[in-house]
Amino acid sequence: MSLEIKICGLSTAETLEASLGAGADMVGMVFFAPSPRHVDFATAATLGAQARGRAQIVALTVDADDATLAAILDALRPDMFQLHGHETPARVAAIRARFGLPVMKALGIASAEDLAALAAYEGVADRLLLDAKPPKGAVLPGGNGVTFDWNLLAGLDLARPFMLSGGLDPENVASAVRLIHPPGLDVSSGVERGPGIKDPSRIEAFLRAARAAEAEGGARRPTGDTPAGAKPTPPSPARETSPS
């Protein structure tokens, strides 16, 4: 299967169209008021209609209650919920059962010890999103423009597909694809020209670089396989951005 790429935090018709036109497999809308990428229900409905049938639509939430999730479902009609808060495995399972949608659970990674938490979510989430842990004092759980040590994922053997996230951008995504061979990629701040302001040219550059690296041999490894080859090298240093 080919590499799946998600452009997250979309909030305008122009940038959504740029993502769809460049070949994004998934597009994400954020429902979290502190985020500069937050969209209201009316905007979400309009964007959902634009994207429907052209890419999978993902609704990102942070510790949302059932009433909020129901309102999002009614407005956006997403294909998937992305849970980016402190949702427990039990809460993930409950959301999946109640709303009948696939669920992607985001988990923060900073050290090898953080990988131990993955097992508890594999049985209840349809996908895992492996993101950099937010910097100390950050308001947002993701979209902070920082990476983690991708070498931690070497040899990772999961029963569920995962998406790599955290500090990805057009300049480093090829290295990530070649090193990790991830089933999927998720980008937000790395394709922006300012907090919450997506840049169509960066969106197109990101997708182009990722697809080129995939074609060169960084294609998706089947779920459960481990990357082969020489000892991996660390990613480039995190891109400095303001929390967004």
Image (cartoon, rainbow, N blue to C red):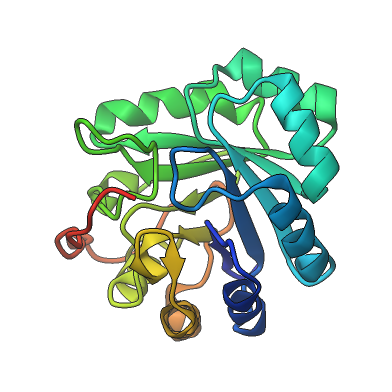
Q: How many marks?
A: 0
- In the image, 185 versus 123, the foreground residue is 185
Query: On screen, 109 above or below 45?
Result: above
Relative side of 35 to 50, left or right: left
User: In the figure, 53 relative to 106: above or below?
Assistant: below
The residue depicted at 37 percent of the width and 35 percent of the height is 108
Instruction: Determine whether, in the image, residue 241 is placed left or right of residue 139.
Output: left
Residue 218 against residue 224 in the figure, above or below: below
Q: Is residue 139 left or right of residue 205?
A: left
The quadrant where residue 115 appears: top left
What residue appears at the point 47 percent right and 29 percent down from the top-left corner?
118
Q: Nearer the viewer, residue 208 or 193?
A: 193
Q: Nearer the viewer, residue 100 or 229?
A: 100
Say which residue appears at 80% left-offset and 30% top-offset.
70
Q: Position of residue 151 (x, y in %)?
A: 25, 51
In which quadrant of the rendered image does the N terminus lie? bottom right
- Residue 47 quadrant: bottom right
**Residue 225 visible here:** no
Horizontal side of residue 207 vs 232, given as left or right? right
Tell me residue 165's x, y (percent): 41, 53
Q: Is residue 161 visible?
A: yes
- Position in image of residue 55 (x %, y %): 73, 67
Q: Position of residue 44 (x, y in %)?
A: 71, 54
Identity of the residue furthest to the top in this view: 90
Viewer-side residue, 217 vs 173: 173
The residue depicted at 59 percent of the width and 43 percent of the height is: 60
